[in-house]
Amino acid sequence: MNLFRSVQAVTNASGDGHVDWAAVAEAAKASTPPGSIDLSADDRAGYAADVRDARSRLRSVGEVEFDLPRTVEVQNRHHWIDANVRTFERVMRPLETHGPEVLPGVTRVVNSGTMAFVLSFLGKNVLGQYDPLLLAEGDDDHSLYFVHPNIVRVADVLDVDYPRFRRWIAFHEVAHAAEFGAAPWLSEHLETRMERGLAALASGELDRDAFRDLDAAMTAVEGYAELLMDRAFDAEYADLRAKLDARRRGGGPVARLVRRLLGLGLKRRQYERGAAFFEAVADARGVAAASAVWDDPANLPTDEELDAPHLWLRRVQPANG
């Protein structure tokens, strides 16, 4: 880790845009130890078995058909930063076309430094990621990443068995693959709402409907994954759930502040609210009934229905309601 090189990369930010993404990548990696991905034979076999078993169990329990993305990678933190710099650049592009023109060099340095800090913080904490490549052009396939150094570190910090913890993370990320595989329309649904919301922000407006729809859809995505992994995981998991929930809420004061600034408290709320919705649906009708959410975009729960699952059941499955 080289903080001086990180600061230097940011202060030397250049180009015509509001963010110098090459400087962001350099600064984020300079301030983040990459961690080792010198995997043992047992590790390699373990990741492969975890992903394969998760796919089989999730297909069976959720009664959903899906395939894994072609790209399944075990990464270090720098690999993850490189992949997500491209994602951040795509998402921020609408906002970069607008904004203050006063002191553009200063604005570029500040923005680049902010993005580098965000990616560095996330790179040190993300365990796994299903990347649907939102807003990507072309026919790029979705990707599945495991940030091995973070999985090893967090298993140690939480004092849980590392192979079991690695398997738990695999089930969670493959559950997201199940959602996007079962709902080919989901990526476009999220993209259109994201584009609408960002375009409005870039114009100095707030499209509340777009962000409300996006929040409801992401709450469904996070909640269904929680339900599916809990029902499909093939071992006791109560201790893992409790410790991971505490990790989402915890950390030191600086970490809690950063999570709040990054909106990670909202993500936790999506987990909890979505999980409560789908648990209620599954308890009432079974996991297959919950999986009907991916049959059609109209089946996504509304903001009101997320807090009243019986309304969703009455609307989506009236014959049984």
Image (cartoon, rainbow, N blue to C red):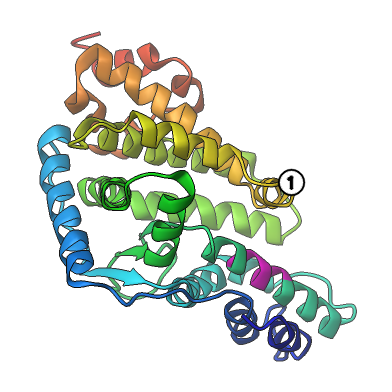
Q: Quadrant of the C terminus?
A: top left
Q: Which residue lies at the image location 52% right of the left edge and 54% below the top edge?
A: 194
Asked whether, in this view, residue 100 is left or right of residue 211, the answer is right
Instruction: Identify which residue, 317 or 177, lies in the foreground.
Output: 177
Q: Which residue lies at the image location 32% right of the left edge and 77% below the top edge?
A: 38
The residue tagged 1 is: 253
Q: Position of residue 121 (x, y in %)?
A: 61, 63
Q: Quadrant of the N terminus?
A: bottom right
Secondary-structure class at tag 1: helix
Q: Position of residue 291 (x, y in %)?
A: 23, 32
**Location of residue 108 with respect to 309 vertically, above or below:** below
**Location of residue 103 with respect to 236 vertically, above or below:** below
Q: How many discs mark residues in the rendered view?
A: 1
Work out whether residue 216 can be spotted: no
Amino acid at the residue labelled 1: Pro
Q: Is residue 118 magenta?
A: yes
The residue segment tinted magenta is 114-119
Q: Position of residue 154 (x, y in %)?
A: 46, 53
Q: Position of residue 240 (x, y in %)?
A: 37, 37
Query: How packed is label 1: few (under 14 Cα within 10 Å), some, or many (20 or more)?
Result: few
Instruction: Identify which residue, 21 or 152, lies in the foreground.
Output: 152
Q: Main secondary structure of the magenta part?
A: helix
